[in-house]
Image: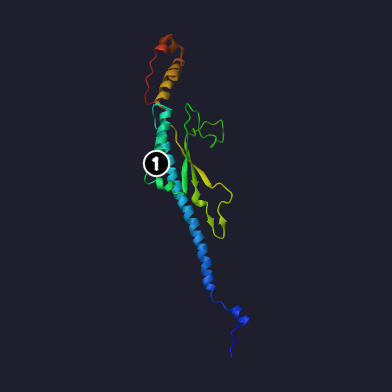
């Protein structure tokens, strides 16, 4: 008569159910990797969308206008319109990504640029001014808790980066008039003493500036 208790040696050699265990373990690992890769690929795609927004705002700001304040208003209006765009708005309002904190630095009257963030290697070398706009980009989708690995960013403030659109700002109409009136005419008179004699003592007062597209 066969006993109902299985031999311990036979139990150790029994491999039934191991395939199911391996499958469950592997499917969990595969699911975690898929979630991580999806988060990274989606984030990189959204970075490209955010970079397009930064470029569009910078381009709107760089166009010539009456004053520098008008240029800043054009940049802010462009950024607001892109935030409310029916295609782009859902991408940054679902809690996964956030873009904002528009920082405008165009030199000129404000004398602010991004040289503190992107310094030149040689301070004596005169290079392209670091002007344009900058946005804060936050990818909350990357702040996830992966099974078996734990949270991706424990104790930190999330994944953040800057999206920068550097573009040289065109001079405004006010800047052109000021340059022509206060600098160009005086520079012409200073070229040679003959010019000052021809112009006369009251020429600076009687001079009428006429701006052109060569400002």
Above or below 164: residue 188: above
State the residue at coordinates (53%, 69%): 22
Q: Quadrant of residue 3?
A: bottom right
**Residue 149 at x, y percent in the picture:** 57, 58
Query: Could you tell me how many numbered marks the image carries?
Result: 1
Task: Identify the residue at image location x=49%, y=56%.
Answer: 37
Indicate the quadrant where residue 182 lies.
top left
The quarter of the picture where the C terminus appears is: top left
Q: Nearer the viewer, residue 205 or 153?
A: 153
Q: Determine crowd level at label 1: few under 14, some 14-19, many 20+ residues with C-alpha closer than 10 A.
A: some
Q: Is 44 rendered above or below residue 120? A: below
Q: Is residue 162 above or below residue 72?
A: below
195 shown above or below 17? above
* Residue at position x 42%, y 42% in the image: 53
Residue 93 in the image, given as x and y percentages of width and height: 43, 46
Which of the 4 image quarters holds residue 208? top left
Residue 54 x %, y %: 44, 40
For this orientation, the residue located farthest to the bottom is 1
Q: Of 135 and 158, which appears nearest the observer? A: 158
- The residue where tag 1 is placed is 82
Taking the image as shown, residue 48 lies to the left or right of residue 6, namely left
Where is residue 168? Give x, y as percent: 44, 33
Dot 1: what SS? helix
In-front residue for pair 15/109: 15
Instruction: Say which quadrant the N terminus sits in.
Output: bottom right
């Amino acid at each position: 008569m066969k006993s109902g208790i299985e031999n311990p040696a036979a139990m150790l050699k029994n491999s039934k159910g191991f395939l199911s265990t391996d499958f469950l373990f592997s499917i969990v690992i595969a699911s975690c990797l898929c979630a991580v890769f999806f988060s990274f690929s989606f984030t990189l795609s959204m970075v490209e969308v955010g970079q397009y927004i930064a470029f569009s705002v910078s381009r709107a700001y760089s166009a010539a206008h009456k004053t520098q304040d008008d240029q800043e208003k054009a940049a802010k209006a462009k950024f607001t319109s892109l935030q409310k765009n029916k295609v782009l708005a859902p991408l940054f309002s679902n809690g996964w990504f956030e873009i904002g904190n528009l920082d405008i630095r165009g030199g000129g009257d404000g004398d602010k640029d991004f040289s503190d963030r992107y310094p030149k290697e040689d301070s004596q070398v005169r290079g392209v001014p670091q002007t344009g706009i900058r946005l804060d980009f936050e990818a909350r989708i990357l702040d996830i808790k992966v099974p078996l690995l734990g949270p991706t960013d424990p104790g930190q403030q999330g994944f953040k980066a800057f999206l920068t659109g550097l573009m040289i700002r065109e001079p405004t109409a006010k800047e052109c008039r000021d340059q022509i009136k206060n600098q160009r005419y005086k520079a012409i008179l200073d070229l040679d003493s003959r010019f000052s004699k021809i112009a006369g003592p009251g020429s600076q007062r009687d001079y009428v500036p006429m701006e052109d597209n060569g400002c």
